[in-house]
Image: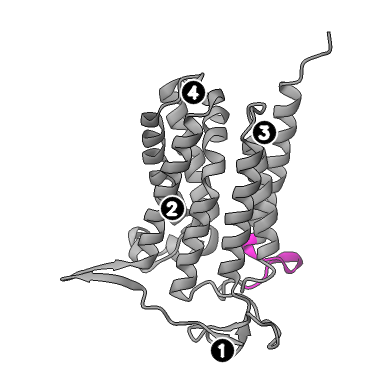
Amino acid sequence: MLVHPQFDPIALRVGPLAIHWYGITYLIAFGLFLWLAGRRARMPQHAAVGWTRQDVDDVLFYGVLGVVLGGRLGYCFFYKPDYYLHHLAEIVEVWKGGMSFHGGLLGVLLALYLFGRRRGRSFFEVSDLIAPCVPPGIAAVRLGNFINGELWGRPAPADLPWAMVFPQAHDGGIARHPSQLYQAAGEGLLLFIILWFYARKPRATGQISGVFMMGYGVLRFVAEYFREPDDFLGLRALQLSQGQWLSLPMVVVGAVIFAWATKRNQRPAG
């Protein structure tokens, strides 16, 4: 049985300025996105329709706004709506923590729509380009959660070799699953491998986006069985967590998008 190393969440202090590891993981996520999306923009199927590195830089700007605004609003209204409806001023206090992936995703989807509209590109043309570039950033942020010792897992068998005690937990002596690392490996590394190799060949417009939605939804749903539900929510209907209920629509929507894209791009035999 292991004990969480209790990393200092502050990586560097420069006078009164404190640079947190969590913030660094977001910077790493954005950096990985730029590198990977730049590579995808140079692929023949994307370069042929005019994608450039400047487009990648611009879509990142839109995406960052979507992640931050959507992630914060999603946390406030998916997880603590009653509290924040009565404390509206605290919604902007992002330094106190509280971000939702599902809210961030909705924010990014809106940002991609606005970007595509300004550039004369369809929504799925944009989302298909960037979808394989997102999972490494998810992995980086989950590692930030692990460094902070937050979002720990459910109780694990004490004889599980990698079971870990998180002293920050209200019952800090219990061995738990390091679910942050599970999510980094699943929603991050595994999903990246699947999407990157799937997207290397030209695909029907919308298929890559559909695979991303289905893949993330399934992997997050499974990971939630090892992640401790938020103590202020607990398990919801059917003994599923809030994260699982938010992931199920992703699987359904992803499947619909994939089927629609496949059917739309089929050509009758001549």
Question: Residue under circle 4?
Answer: 47
- Identify which amino acid the numbered label 1 is placed on: Asp
Q: Position of residue 121 (x, y in %)?
A: 49, 23
Question: CB of mark 3 within 8 Å of CB of mark 1?
Answer: no
Residue 68 versus residue 54 in the image, above or below: below
- Identify which amino acid the numbered label 3 is placed on: Gln
- Looking at the rendered image, the disc whose residue lies closer to the viewer, 1 or 4, is 4
Among numbered discs 4 and 3, the one appearing first in the sequence: 4
- Identify which amino acid the numbered label 2 is placed on: Ala
Q: Mark 3: which secondary structure?
A: helix
Q: CA distance from mark 3 to mark 1?
A: 44 Å
Residue pushed farthest left?
A: 15
Q: Which mark is residue 29?
A: 2
Q: Mark 1: which secondary structure?
A: loop
- Looking at the rendered image, the disc whose residue lies closer to the viewer, 3 or 1, is 3
Q: Position of residue 190 (x, y in %)?
A: 64, 54
Question: Residue under circle 1?
Answer: 171
- Part of the protein shown in magenta: 234-243
Q: Nearer the viewer, residue 12 or 94?
A: 12
Q: Position of residue 60 (x, y in %)?
A: 40, 40
Among numbered discs 1 and 4, the one appearing first in the sequence: 4
